Image: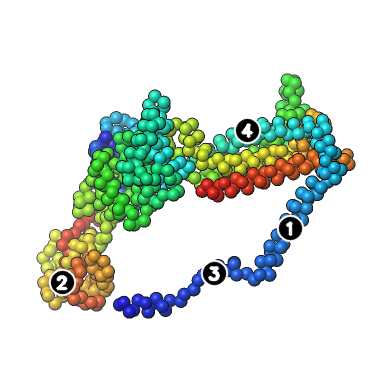
Amino acid sequence: MAAVIPAALSTRPVRTAVPRATRDPAWARWLLTGIALLFLAGFLVLPLAIVFGEAFSKGVPYFLAAVSEPEARAAIRLTLLTVAIVVPANVIFGIAAAWTIAKFKFPGKSLLTTLIDLPFAVSPVVAGLLYVLVFGAQGWFGPWLIAHNIRVIFAVPGIILATTFVTFPFVARELIPLMQAQGTDEEYSAVVLGANGWQTFWRVTFPNIRWGLFYGVILCNARAMGEFGAVSVVSGHIRGETNTIPLHVEILYNEYNITAAFAVASLLALLALATLVFKSVVEWRQSHAS
Amino acid sequence: MSIEAHGIRKKFGSYTALDGVDLNVPQGKLVALLGPSGSGKTTLLRIIAGLEFPDPGSGRVLFHGDDVTDVPAGKRKVGFVFQHYALFRHMTVLDNVAFGLRVRRRRDRPSSAAISERAHRLLELVQLDGLAGRYPSQLSGGERQRVALARALAVEPKVLLLDEPFGALDARVRKDLRRWLRKFHDEIQLTTIFVTHDQEEALEIADEVVIMNKAHVEQVGTPQQVYDRPASPFVYQFLGNVNVLRAPALAEGRRRGRPEEAAPEGQIYVRPHDIEVTAHDAGGDGVSAIVRHIHAAGPHARLLLEQVQTREHVEVDISRSDLAALELTVNDLVRFRLRQTHSFDEDYAI
């Protein structure tokens, strides 16, 4: 027997498996990488560079003046106010929706999941129009609102509502797959060990989703600041009152005030860059945490 | 604390998980809920724990005689170990074990020094004290299992419930850990129910085995009782290998004066090791058969015989020394006799 075994082993062909994909010819790899880089440069890096280039084309003092004149400051203030309301609201909604969908079984669950995606499917302009139809002067609640002297459309509440609608899915969409993957066993464990609902959430569920949640918040925040379509419909473009940063950029641009437009736009671009950096940090943290 | 369940029914939509199940677990016993997947055993365990509730009006769960059917899981004083342990992944082993004490209301909560001391003591009990600062992802399957056990024991449960406690472990660790669990149970004397689909596991360590099938309890008894006197064809087949023979196949054997072995119309159930094989030319009674296969790599030799008359196959386990004495090779002619058989009424569907 002892003599047979090595003989049998030696007849087995020795071959180190190399995955096919890594053996593509060099020219194919360089070509594909080159196309991807060229595309990135043309469609992402170049426009970004132009934004900053244009913004500072008349020097730093002009840039500072453009972003600090009263109308620009009002736009920045309104955008920050909107974000300060919309992001927390969508965090609360997103956690509640994701928790419900991921941890419980109930009739109508798939309908709720679909509804959460609705703002992604609907054009923001249509979303804005919906609010006009509901709250506008000729809308369903219009007469009642006018009678009570409440302004929704062409005022700050409308902007907040429209932004909330558009950014609705970000947090929930981020959390649902995460919570579904984590299952319910840890929560059940906590419950059997005597934890109440609040303790279960804060001590077990929340620590498991915090990075996913943070990621959702970053995306939600970026979109809330940058939203144009829906806000444009409901805002009424009242200078110094109902203009957000993107609307202010548009006005400046339409008035051929190109450099100022780019200066304000560069603020949004800066936000986008900061978001990307944040996102990479979060992703890095996540991959190292698990 | 004893556990009783009476008339438990549970449906998930149109699927019936439990259909009027009764269970009685005496104080201090180690009981196995054994059954194939989908038999309802895990659902029953979760109902006992309070993680699921029986269908309204269907049945009651009693702990030590007290009705706990409507008591929430956190107040039942049960320790539950999940199949995949469900350790809190962002907490250290020590924090996992201490969790049940830390979530208590302040007036019931021990001081943090006392909690940490108790957690350390429990980790010692499960032989893991050196790993208190690790995270669950840094532990092996067997270690996680024992952390889950320590965590369940931290709240001083009156009942311990284990869902497939060894299901996610590899064969070798499984064997060690189930012996350890038996020893552990003997030390702490806590009423314990564990769910398993592995009959070997249940028969080896349980005081009592509850065999479930298709939302019903098929049989309850000590491992020896259920193995030696199965109440139904299902139990017979579930607990180890069995030959199911058509009765007429043994006509030859019956003619030779062993009529009690076969019900005329029914089927005969016989375990491979309850069959005796002799050389054909030795004469005597028994059914003639041809050796079709010999599998001798193991503690016993397993023969596959083909009956000469009916061509029906029969599996037989004989000791390796018997095999050597018989000097059998494939295609030899032999006789076999059934030592111990079972038959069930024909209308008892399997």
Q: Which residue is mark 4?
A: A89
Tag 2 secondary structure = strand
Marks 3 and 1, the one that precedes in the sequence: 3
User: Alpha carbon of mark 2 to alpha carbon of mark 1: how far?
Assistant: 82 Å
Instruction: Name the kind of residue labelled 2 in the image.
Output: Thr
Q: Residue B237 in the image: x percent, y percent?
A: 28, 57
Three-letter amino acid code of the residue under disc 4: Ala
The quarter of the displayed image where residue A186 is located = top left
Subunit bearing disc 4: A
Q: Is residue B229 left or right of residue A45?
A: left
Badge number at residue A231: none
Q: Which residue is at 85% across, 42% downward?
A: A59
Read off the residue under disc 3: A18
Q: In the rendered structure, which disc, 1 or 4, sits on the residue that comes first in sequence? A: 1
Determine the image quadrant of residue A127.
top right
Relative image position of residue B11 (x, y in whole percent) = 40, 41
Q: Which residue is mark 1?
A: A39
Q: Nearer the viewer, residue B18 or B177?
A: B177
Disc 1: host chain: A
Q: CA distance from mark 2 to mark 3?
A: 56 Å
Residue appearing at x 67%, y 39% in the figure? A221
Q: Horizontally, is B145 left or right of B234 in the view?
A: right
- What residue sits right under mark 2 in the picture? B278
Q: What whole-number distance in Å separates the C-alpha atoms at marks 4 and 3?
A: 51 Å
Q: Is the Cβ of the residue at disc 2 closer than 8 Å to that at disc 1?
A: no
